[in-house]
Image: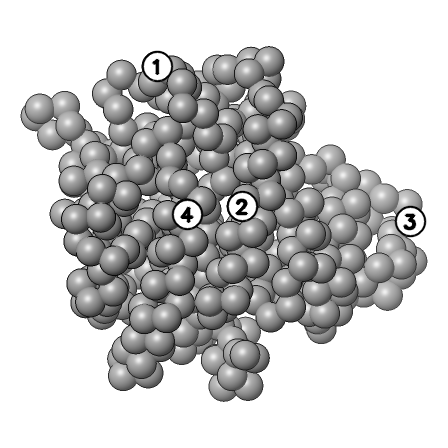
Amino acid sequence: MFIGHFTEQPWQKEDWPTAWGSGVMEVSNSEYDPFRAANLYNRYMDEKVYAEEMGFDGIMVNEHHSAPFCMNGVANVTASILARITSKAKIVILGNILPIHDDPLWLAEGLAMIDVISRGRLVPGIVRGGGNESLAHNAPPHFNRERFEEAHDFLIKTWTTPGPFRWEGKHYHYRYVNPWAVPYQKPHPPIWVPGTSSRETVEWAAKHRYPYMMLASQLDLTQQMYQIYYDAARQEGYEAGPQHLGFMFFCHVDETEERAIEVGRTLTQGVRSPYDPGAQRPRPWIEGPPGISTKSARALRRKMVASDSSGRTRAGARATFEDQVATHGMIVGTPDTVVPKVRYIMETLRPGTIIFRTGDGAMSHQDQMRTLKLMGEEVLPAMREIAKELGLPGPYDVDPRTNEPVAALAS
């Protein structure tokens, strides 16, 4: 099993107005305080280094744009720093938003450098991105999937084909492709694909045998998306296994149940919080501009945030703290109570990768460091034993491309 750590790296400000919500394309950057930002960036780096020290296999970073709930506007900057200040953990980018890149050659060069500096620890995940990413970077939403797939094909060719060569596609044109930097890993770094609601993306990932990571969704909907992957894999002539599938969810571990609940609640507070009924949600045309997603993806997304007769969303990312805990969308407790709940997820979904989302919302640095320590000392070792018992290999135990066993994850 592969176990990762992630935080959205949210902006933290005690007097952030509730009505601003997560601030996506709604709040002027005049509110940005570089001095506060410097402290937060360095805090999050310290936490990632400590996560490696406590035994996490990977450190996940992502990016969002014009979005205070995620300070990491350029994931590759963070990944570049981690390549030098860490030594063991995989650097998992979930992921680079391919459709907003007008120059994927520059992206190929940057990722190759990160892979080389880290001596082959990069996992360059790729995503299509949300509506605000396309709008913020003036990328046409109706070409989102086309640009994603062509940029992917260009990256793979650039990493695996000696130059110089010429590229003439629909969206990208190069007379000369011959970057001096090429990846450390051969034939190229392993690509992972995260998502939540797009059947087409799941099928595309299965076609390429790329591990698919389901992000903070209800268990039943996650099972549905996993089944789509299994079915698509069979159509491609292979049997998918745990090494092809991952799951990310909120978690907080503390010394007592009472403290776990008190501190865990902060995961749903602060700038990141969409849970307060008074918070401003991103406008529909920002979340999903015309052309960026299919009807099936929009239908599933509506189901993920569906409200009951009282108008309350009972599960998923927009549910309250209590409802997320009740539906296993968020796990809080002591090591003794958290491990059985994590085991339930492992038994129900059978993922080969689990990424814990911690230190998010309004959680303090001290609370995050304490949970990382408890997870490293007690939760992670128990999970590895459960994974062996259940037969849940990760993508570094069984190669997703060949389904053949590989050397154990280096410690």
Is label 1 in a helix, a strand or a loop? helix
Q: Which residue is mark 2?
A: 44
Q: Is residue 298 above or below residue 243?
A: above
Q: Is the residue under label 4 in contact with that under label 1 (CB below 8 Å)? A: no
Q: Is the residue under label 2 in contact with that under label 1 (CB below 8 Å)? A: no
Is the residue marked by circle 2 packed among few (<14), some (14-19), or many (20+) residues within 10 Å?
Answer: some
Question: x, y percentage for residue 356?
Answer: 38, 56
Q: In the visual, does 98 lie left or right of 27? A: right
| Amino acid found under the numbered disc labelled 2 | Tyr
Q: In the visual, does 29 lie left or right of 291? A: right
Is label 4 in a helix, a strand or a loop? helix
In primary-sequence order, the first of circles 1 and 4 is 1
Query: Observer-nearest residue: 151 or 52?
Result: 52
Q: Which residue is mark 3?
A: 176
Question: x, y percentage for residue 271?
Answer: 41, 27
In primary-sequence order, the first of circles 3 and 1 is 1
Q: Is residue 97 above or below residue 252?
A: above
| Amino acid found under the numbered disc labelled 3 | Tyr
Q: Is residue 275 above or below residue 201?
A: above
Q: In the visual, does 76 lie left or right of 353? A: right
The alpha-carbon separation of the residues under discs 2 and 3 comes to 39 Å
Label of residue 366 in the image:
4
The alpha-carbon separation of the residues under discs 1 and 4 comes to 27 Å
